[in-house]
Amino acid sequence: AAIGSSGAKARDGWSSRSAFILAAVGSAVGLGNMWRFPAEAGANGGGAFVLFYILCVALIGLPILLSETLIGRHGQSSAPESVRRIAKESGKSSHWDTLASFGVLGAFLVLSFYCVVGGWVLYYIGVFAQDLFSTGVTGGAFEGRPAGDIEALLPSLFGNGGLMVGLHIAFIAITFYFVSRGVSSGIEWVATWLMPAFFVLFLLITIYGAFTGAFSEALSYLFTFDASKLTGAVMLAAVGQAFFSLSLGVAGMMTYGAYVGRDVNLAGTSGIIAGADTAVALLAGLCIFPIVFAAGLEPNGGPGLMFQSLPIGFQSMPFGSVVGLLFFVMVFFAALTSSVSLMEAPTAWLKDKAKVTRPMATLIVTVAALLLGILAALSFNDLSDFQPFGFIPLFEGQGMFDVLDTVTSKVLMPIGAIMTALFVGWVAERRLIDSENGLSGGLEKVWLFLVRWLCPLALITILIVGIFPSIL
Ligand code: PFF
């Protein structure tokens, strides 16, 4: 399925506009929505975080998303090469490609710890499947077992270094399989089958949660705005989450943009992608918190929310073991459509740079991310004292898993986004930008203003206040 880009030789790409939308929504919707968003909202005080998050998506995330896909489509290449081409065409220094090289590095780093969490999802699929066989369809999950037992599943997984590494390898191997098959027959296949399945399951489980759980309590927790809770750290967390969730700042969307046909309106599709991603994040909150509140548990965030509190919630619900199993299968679908995009960014780069075949490039990226991910997986157990960056305040007390998460979402993604905004707003030639963005009139002016001024200034401010809170 080649795309018809003005006379260029047929290259691998999305077979249609809807394939692109599904793949990009698949990249955006993932563990970031289902696991990280509710956990971050819980850890950062609920409503203040959520509302600031929505603001970040609309005013910063969306304009950057359009900028990234636009760079990709115009450059028709891996992210750094696309930036270099546009810089050259605009008569500017080709060194701007460094911005996208950092992005490629960022995607690689996210991939390494993302597949570790993907491994936990595989584990919970196994746990719920086993439970379903023993308790039957109608009962709640883990019938007759004390809540403490269910809660202990996660620490006991974390304590088992060998199992953590094995699950990580399994998840990254599945990702490798699809990426090595190429864009139209591998990545697109995953997106077009798994994303619709995800949406069906997601709607069913959310409706189920709304009827059987503490829905109104969750609603007021997520949407009550308390301005006093909006600190610099909370704002940085919200911006970081917005980028993580929209797959921005790490060359992922630039890479996907390169496979889009010329007939696609990028502004319109960016709106659909950002809208769908935000809707899923909010609904994930409205799916998970009612179940957690109904079980009388605290909403405090962190990794335990989805993997500990939620399974306890499923215990007291009718059909809990089936719904629990379907829930984790659905999260697996969402995670896989994201991990393929994380792997594609460095793979496309390597394929370009080293002139190797796709399977070879995919293999090299996989092995490297697998090794780094092992360090992340072991930071929960055997290597918990290995804190090589602990001397930097931002990484104080963090093992490799947390360092990778923090450095990507709170440093590389915001910096990648600032550079993208500056590049599109000030460096690239206007004519070229105008011909790609699919906007006209007032909307185009608004977008240019956001990209030129608001995005860079707001992001620089948030980065500084978030990283150095003491200056305030
Ligand atoms: N957006 C994905 C999620 O929310 O889980 C994670 C992600 C995918 C981040 C691809 C960055 C990326 F390039």
Image: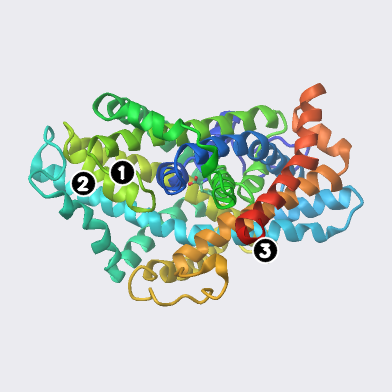
- How many numbered marks appear? 3
Q: Residues within 10 Å of mark 2 (few under 14, many from 20)?
A: many
Specify the color scheme. rainbow
Residue 138 appears in the figure: yes
Compared across the picture, whether 43 is left or right of 129 comes to right
The residue type indicated by label 3 comes to Lys
Callout 3 secondary element: loop
Alpha carbon separation for disc pair 1 and 3:
38 Å
Identify which residue is drawn at 72% across, 33% down.
262
Compared across the picture, whether 84 is left or right of 380 comes to right
Circles 2 and 1 in contact, beta carbons < 8 Å: yes
What residue would you read off at disc 1? 328
Instruction: Work out whether residue 69 or residue 380 is closer to the camera in this orientation and state it.
Output: 380
What residue would you read off at disc 3? 355
- The image quadrant where one finds the N terminus is top right
Residue 69, position in %: x, y? 68, 41
The residue type indicated by label 2 comes to Phe
Residue 346 appears in the figure: no
Compared across the picture, whether 406 is left or right of 196 comes to right
Q: Residues within 10 Å of mark 1 (few under 14, many from 20)?
A: many
What residue would you read off at disc 2? 128
- Identify whether 6 is placed above or below 380: above
Does the beta carbon of the residue at mark 3 sit less than 8 Å from ligand 1?
no
Residue 468, position in %: x, y? 63, 61
- The image quadrant where one finds the C terminus is bottom right
Q: Earlier in the sequence, mark 3 or mark 2?
A: 2
Identify which residue is drawn at 60% across, 59% down.
106
Callout 1 secondary element: helix
Residue 64, position in %: x, y? 69, 41
